[in-house]
Amino acid sequence: MSEALRILPGTVADLNEVMVTMAEAFDPRFGEAWTAAQCRGMLGTPGLWLILARHGDEPAGFALARVVVDEAELLLIAVRPSARRLGTGSALVGEIARIAAANGARRLMLEMRDGNPAARLYSAAGFAEIGRRPGYYTGREKERFDAITLGRSLDN
Ligand SMILES: CC(C)(COP(=O)(O)OP(=O)(O)OC[C@H]1O[C@@H](n2cnc3c(N)ncnc32)[C@H](O)[C@@H]1OP(=O)(O)O)[C@@H](O)C(=O)NCCC(=O)NCCS
């Protein structure tokens, strides 16, 4: 994927594109992916933001976030395996932080499975660990994985 990266606003009409990326991006062992019904339900709620990443016209990834008063939560972020390590995930996080701050949020939070290599992306983007939820994710074999709660300030 060498074409220019673009970040665009998405809507519920983009659900199919989101679900293709979801299926490719998340390892089913860990129980992190959402179903189409969960995404559709979430996209109908106020304060919800979906953004899409494209490399040229090719779908590359997405991020879903929620802003509630002065706190934003990055609910999902995924990049297709063929589009990784090109700055797409970082660009999605940067755009979510910009949107959240523009909509009044002062903090951006997220939950990450303990051991997810995405940790490096988040620490480079200014996130720090603020808590842990034991057994938050349920894997394919019903095993449980802890979630780490990460947060960063959006104040400049
Ligand atoms: C996490 C994810 C979104 C990263 O997307 P990406 O487009 O590859 O991210 P970037 O290219 O912006 O990576 C930025 C930096 O993060 C780090 N990083 C990202 N993925 C990494 C990995 N698998 N292993 C080690 N470091 C990684 C690197 O430091 C990278 O910079 P570099 O490529 O210059 O070394 C992607 O791997 C993904 O979709 N994973 C599966 C879904 C998932 O786990 N989402 C997060 C849930 S909390």
Image (tube, grey):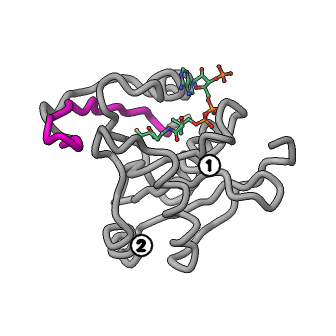
Q: Where is mark 1, residue-wise?
A: 95
Residue 141 on the magenta span: yes
Q: Is residue 86 left or right of residue 146?
A: right
Residue ID at (34%, 22%): 115
Q: Where does the image place residue 152, in percent across and percent down from the top left?
A: 43, 32
Residue 32 in picture, x, y percent from top left: 32, 46
Residue 81, quarter of the rendered image: top right
In the image, what residue occupies the spot 47% across and 55% down?
A: 22
The residue segment tinted magenta is 138-154
Dot 1 or dot 2: first in sequence order is 2
Quarter of the N terminus within the rendering: top right
Type of amino acid at the residue the image marks with label 2: Leu
Report helix, strand or loop for mark 1: helix
Looking at the rendered structure, the kind of residue marked 1 is Glu
Mark toward the viewer: 1 or 2: 2
Q: Residue at x 42, y 50 (%)?
A: 76
List x then y, in percent, for residue 33.
Answer: 36, 51
